[in-house]
Image: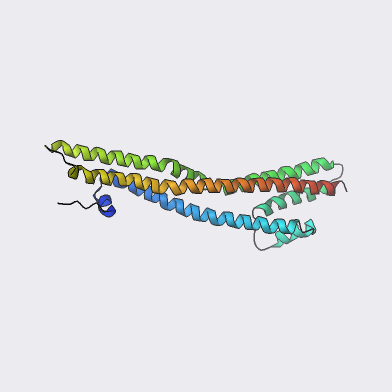
């Protein structure tokens, strides 16, 4: 007599604990892919916006006109635009203040941009901790299901006088499915986390560089 070792059969015949482990891992995998696709779309849009903004910023046009164009747009400002708006707005507000040293005006504008940068990085980092958690814990959750399944498989042999491989194989196979599902959930999460973290770090460096370059322009304007 042959045993049915199809994946569907192994899942349906697994113990309740192992099935719960599989369900948790499948749910984590679905959520991971949801976050992965959303984050990929978000980062691509953010990078495209940064490219467009920097192209306009360094085109030699008037910064006041660029500020008005962005703030008057029906689309809300995002990413690097918010950093520019924060810095330009603060500098313009303080520029007319009499008796305030120019270096303080520039320093205040720089601090405001750094605050906006921190907020932007917090936004871009959203969902990344979840991917890291899924990537680091899913194999262990799957391993728990495997150990539990193998333990139950060997316990069932306690009432058998002569154990054979055919008797223990289905139980071990269904237990190993939990480990396979754990790896299925973990591997994409780890790859996506590393990729997105690298892209976010690149954006952070790009924003920092923009702030430094913008401060230089403000210094020229303040001391002109």
Query: How is the model colour-coded?
Result: rainbow
Report the residue at 19% width, 42% height from top: 165
Q: Quadrant of residue 137 in the image?
A: top left
Q: In this view, which residue lies farthest toward the bottom?
A: 74
Residue 53 at x, y percent in the picture: 70, 57
Report the residue at 26% width, 54% height from top: 6
Total marks in image: 0
Q: Quadrant of residue 21 in the image?
A: top left
Residue 157 at x, y percent in the picture: 17, 38
Residue 161 at x, y percent in the picture: 11, 37
Report the residue at 46% width, 42% height from top: 133
In depth, the one of 3 and 185 nearer the eye is 3
In depth, the one of 180 and 11 nearer the eye is 180
Report the residue at 82% width, 41% height from top: 103
Left or right of residue 107, residue 2 in this image: left
Left or right of residue 165, residue 47 in this image: right
Is residue 77 visible to us here? no
Left or right of residue 98, residue 47 in this image: left
In depth, the one of 42 and 83 nearer the eye is 42
Is residue 215 visible to us here? yes
Residue 129 at x, y percent in the picture: 50, 43
């Amino acid at each position: 007599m042959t045993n049915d070792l199809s994946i569907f059969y192994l899942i349906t015949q697994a113990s309740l604990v192992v099935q719960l482990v599989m369900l948790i891992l499948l749910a984590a995998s679905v959520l991971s892919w949801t976050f992965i696709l959303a984050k990929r779309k978000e980062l691509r849009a953010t990078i495209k916006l940064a490219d467009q903004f920097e192209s306009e910023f360094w085109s030699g046009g008037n910064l006041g006109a660029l500020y008005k164009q962005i703030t008057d747009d029906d689309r809300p400002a995002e990413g690097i635009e918010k950093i520019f708006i924060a810095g330009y707005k603060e500098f313009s507000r303080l520029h007319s203040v009499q008796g305030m040293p120019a270096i303080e005006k520039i320093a205040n504008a720089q601090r405001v941009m750094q605050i906006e940068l921190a907020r932007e990085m917090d936004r871009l980092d959203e969902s990344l901790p979840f991917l890291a958690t899924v990537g680091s814990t899913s194999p262990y959750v799957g391993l728990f299901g495997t150990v539990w399944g193998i333990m139950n498989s060997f316990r069932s042999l306690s009432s058998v006088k002569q154990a054979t491989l055919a008797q223990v194989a289905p139980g071990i196979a269904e237990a190993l499915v939990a480990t396979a599902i754990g790896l299925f959930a973990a591997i994409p999460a780890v790859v996506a986390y590393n990729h997105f973290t690298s892209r976010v770090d690149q954006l952070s460096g790009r924003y920092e560089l923009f702030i430094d370059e913008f401060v230089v322009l403000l210094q020229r304007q303040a001391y002109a």
